[in-house]
Amino acid sequence: MKKLLTLFFSSLALFSVMAQVDKGNLLIKNGTVITITKGNLEQTDVLIKDGKIAQIAKNIQAPAGVRVIDATGHYVMPGIIDAHSHIALDGINEGTNPITPEVSEEDVINPFQIGIYRALGGGITTVHAMHGSANAIGGQCETIKLRYGNFDPDALKMEGAPRTIKFALGENPTRSHGEGSGIVPRTRMGVEFVIRQAFSEAKEYSEAWSKYNKNKLVKGFRGAPPAYSYRHEVLSDILNDKIIIHCHSYRADEIYMMLKVCKDFGIKRIVFQHVNEGFKVAPELAAQGAMASVFSDWWAYKFEVYYSTAYNAAILTRNGVVTSINSDDAEMMRHLYHEAGKTQKYGALTDEEALALITINPAKQLGIESRVGSLEVGKEGDIVIFKNHPLSIYGVPMYTIVDGIVWFDREKDPDDMRLVVDPKQNIDNAMLRDKNSDLDHCMEGAEFILDSELFNANKK
Amino acid sequence: MIKTITLLRSISGVFALLLFASSLQAQEEKELKPVTRTYAVTNVNVIQAPGKKIEMATVLIKDGLIVSVGKGISIPPEAIVIKADSMYVYAGFIDGLSRVGVARPKEEPSRERVKDPGNPTPERAGITPQNDVRYSLNPADKSIEDLRNIGFTVAQVAPYGNLLPGQSSIVLLGGKSIDQMVLINNSALYSELSGANNVYPNTIMAVMAKWRELYRQASQSKSYQSLYASNRTGLERPASDRVLEAFYPVIDQKMPVLFKSEKMLETHRILKLKSDLGFALTLGDIKEGWPIVNKIKSSGAKVFLALDLPEEIKKEEKKDDKKADKKADSTKAKEVAKPKTATDLEKDALEKRRAEAITNYTSQASTFAKAGVPFGFSTLSAKAKDIPANLRRMISAGLSEEAALAALTTTPAQLLGLSDRMGTVEPGKMANLVISDKTYFHEKSKVRYVFVDGTLYKMDVKEEKKADPNAKVDIEGSWSTVTQTPQGSNDGKATFKKEGSGYKGTVSGGRMPAPVDMTSVTLEGNKLSYSYSLSFGGNSIKIDVEVTVEGDTFKGNASIGPRGSFSIEGTKNPKN
Amino acid sequence: MKGLQTIIGLAAAIICGVVMHAQAQSPKGKYANVALTNATIETVTKGTIQNGTVLILDGKIAGVGTNVSIPAGTEIIDCKGKFIYPGMIDAGTNLGLNEISAVARTTDFNEIGEVIPQMKALTAVNPNASAIPVTRVSGVTTALTIPTGGMLSGTAALINLHGYTPDQMYAGFEGIVLNFPNTGRRGFFDRRTDDDIKKASEKALASLNDVWEKAIQYHKLDSATKGKTGYYPELQALVPVIRGEQTLLVETNTSKDITAALKWVKEKKVKKVILTGVAEGWRVADEIAKSGIPVITGGVLELPTRDYDRYDRAYANAGLLKKAGVKVAIKSESSNNNYRNLPYHAGFAVAYGMNKEDALKAITIIPAELFGVADKLGSIEVGKSATLFICTGDPFETKTNVSHVFIDGWQMPMVSRQTELYDEFLKRDPGVNKTKK
């Protein structure tokens, strides 16, 4: 990393070839390899070639010129995946309309945010960078890899990852639109209605287009096409299962409602986010193959999370729901391994189950499990090397590797890791976290539309 | 961030209203026609084009055109002779993107809540691509004179607004009427990647989605229009839509899209829209293009780099360092002996990174030149008075003087399709010229004459001469001030009090609820400058005043960043 | 009367039938004389005792060691393979004052006014707050609950997390909270200019100095008139601080502000002071050490305060302060009632450089000392209050479970709403189908 920075200052040419993703070769020697899917391998080496895991075995000879990291006494595990984050984005909420599927976080990736590096420092390699939760149907999200050091936003994208979109139920959309603007939805009834309405209209839209396209084949056909709507195009893609829904939700009733909506519209792929009361409808979630991405222990910051329990992940797991633990927070994402560890206190999950919550399970939820989430030959070389076991409180990420390139090196990286420096920034400027702003960051950017007590309290 | 910007924008409107509320009817001065339109600039060093110089030559101008250039040209009797002995004449400079001469909209976009913020009218959302900047030109706007005074004669000007405010025009920086000013109308479809206040599209991602949707809807409506035109019978009448119709020439590649593209990420995003939709693109006011110069190059977009630069790290600190060096050896030894604390070291490292960052900005133009990307300059966010110094900073950061001149003349002429008319000092070209007493990029160079479309503007350099570093003036006391703004003139009060070796002051007046302390006051000779901030809803804007004091009066400018500059005059009130 | 209650209770039980049975009342605490035997005892102040016994009699620790005689009839809890620790003390919470952060009607920590030191947290502590059992079953037995907002936001109180009235919960310390003028930004929504921030903090300091001057005048007049100066609640609340009898808890975070606070404290000759927050303490650690003023820092699980800071500064802060010679306690600081994570904050401090023993002290004996209650709390010693917990391993580890908690000799039920929901929903009945085949 340091090398990269120095290079940047000395030679601008380095960054002139853009959006070309760097892939590396690396040999990690003699660590305890936690594969997640195939058990633990003691004193084993992992060889990454051209960004992909080429071999996992004992005593691999380092190919000429390949960097070797000695992981003796350390733990080697797949890079951690955060299925719910808002880092690396310029803009989180298009909170003006309850239905905004046409907007996409893909357009506003910000590769310079220091939070990306800090997340690497917590062993994170892949992040689901999400739209916020102001709208019932929010924007499309982007699955990114933390290749911090690239100046091209496109270089962070995980090419080929399935498209995903944010939905939101409950207090946030009703607060934003019902309370904030006086338009539907103001209640959970309204939330269901606007989603069903959007889907129904999209169905009509795509039927109209099919009809038009069919008519066009008839010789001599003359007629007006249906008016193009970007919004309905994206909604149609959701109905055709081309986009995975990630649905912000808390209460059991709204989760159940959304399960029924999906059933009625034939939507198969849905992941519930936060889903604090998912434990109450775990059998229904499991039956429909819906997945859950939860906080380890957050509760009580608003009414809809009041009846929460830190045992949520364990109950969901035991009921057969594919579950992950996410952060939704730039600080918490730095220790998802610790958050996963809490499921051992709250529900006695095994090491394997606990680590799956932050690796292979979130990979499944993002549809990238064939590429990342476990250490297997052929998968991408996204790895974190821990001093002490990752589920121990004393676990410390030492190296974080994406595509075989070391992007975080605890011993060698300099303190100041900013990629760009604002020439106008006052250097002596601290940013403190407001004690009362620990709400889910899903609402960032939508403040203007809210009259919420909380935001007013914060602005005081 | 977007919100901050739009907020600031509306604040500056509020500011103007607050401070300059009372309106005064401007007195129209009746100017006499010039006697002749023939001029001979004699004995001048002609820089015909970058790197092409004729010494001690004559430039003959007639009826708005350059008639001849060279030595031994006979001067017709009707010519007014300008003895430009040992001066330098260049082709008039061309500004690729600015709002010079464009009147600020009287009503700032409303910040009031809209009933259904998800479905605002196009106007409320900032989508008025059918608008024509010509209707908001003001030939008397002082910004025209400011820019002309430093050598600019032509500018591509864009309307105010956020997303798609309208179409730009290329105008002459002179002329008494709008039509006299306009050289090429509807030169580009202007756009900014910034959202509307509190309504859709509010965020950049929604702006981009909206852009794509509008473009695709326009393509669809355009092809249906032509289907309909081919045979109207039996077809539903296509709806008329001013917004979509404004895209038609863009879709036909007959009109480029001109984007403000200051930030690096903004540039990436604009290039993405271009590659998605395929329109011809001009990038204006680029500030952070150095890391993506090759990406810009391969996109084929036309490029105008910003003439605005981040401020240099204050020299005062360095001066102090030098003074410290000159101090007695004993003190110096003591200072050296004192080890730097961790905090000092941290501060040094941070300052170093900041200095490196600033270098990136100043060397941007040279980076583009080295990469072989043709570029012009734009003044959109620059203060006119900073531009010559900024050009010198770019030159000392590696840009050759020839390349700098090309970026002011020949290249923008090419990029804007004006090469047949301007960009060089050659017979047949429009008489757009700038004449300076030294080479233009010399630190002490002053522009003396500017020709725009054959009309002569003489620069008043007297005031500058008055600036006397050794003058002794007494500013202590209270001053009545009058500020001229587009909203009319405004009375105020400034009070100065000596404190130590410097001054402190307060400002009051207009509709300011209470006097405000000046944040800085400096007096060097008879050059007085002071600054103060006004707060609006938790945000503040800074006002910088720079005046020359003469006895009991002063004269100069009050500026609110790049958002505007107004002339200010002051008279000292007699002591009670 | 008792008879009537029984009848009503019976009627309710009949009406509610099975439901009543499923949702049993939370079990009560049990006041018991207990011997905890065969345990590894982490005394904190006197080392580790293997295979030892802790004897609890009449709410106090009556014996600690390998050779403790157990009176006949004493209940015995065999702690083989288990560990005994003193109850953990979270020195920065709003426990009892906050039910749901976003629902204003359920929060009681932020009164109106800039200078309101007379507002007492203890008054508003709700002994039935849902977060209290959630916190204590994790071994956090004692908490400083603090009012926030304004400059002098009120009087914080140390409470034990068991009791039915605030007085039963009160643990022997109250301190005045001062939010020292702040020059940092308060979050992403804080868009003030640097200038505005500077002005606001200068103004705040001037007003603080004014308050202080008046408090000193009041103290002098009050001494001269022997307490007959008249009703002036704000200043009356400050007098004990002026007289050096009560602690001033000074919340300050940026390095500049910490330096300014130290200077202010020195100028005003405030005798009993604790700095709280101290996020950028590492930057000025030597300065703080030199002042001899102790610190309550945290939460540890935080972001660095500046974008150019090393990524792990917040994790390392407590350790760096300790290393410089500062007396450091750790608090968890949380707005979502997760004070149960206090041991993990300490654990992270250890992972990023703090000595493990120091981190344990930072959540036990050090806060007890800072609050002047080290004779009762903070370690396992004879004569101290029986406020302790039994666990299966290192309490900083998430694998470790807490099996028993004692507060003032009361054995706590190991349930909270969160465990109850687990019990009910792990195997929900009915599952997907209501009718059973």
Image: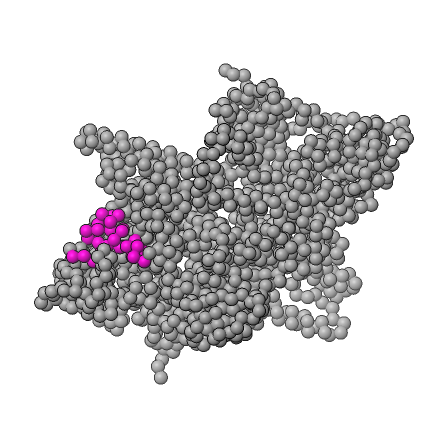
Q: Position of residue A18 (x, y in %)?
A: 63, 59
Magenta span includes C360: yes
- Choose top left, top right, bottom left or bottom right for residue B460: top right
Q: Position of residue A133 (x, y in %)?
A: 48, 59
Left of B291 or right of it: where is A371?
left
Residue beneath the point at 61% across and 21% down: B470
Magenta span includes C41: no
Q: Magenta residues, as a range?
A: C356-382
Q: Position of residue A231 (x, y in %)?
A: 59, 62
Left of A393 or right of it: where is A213?
right
Q: Position of residue C82 (x, y in %)?
A: 24, 67
Residue positioned most to the top:
B576
- Choose top left, top right, bottom left or bottom right for residue C293: top left
The tally of labels here is 0
Residue positioned most to the bottom:
C437
Left of B464 or right of it: where is C367?
left
Residue A352 in view, yes or no: yes
Residue beneath the point at 19% across and 51% down: C375
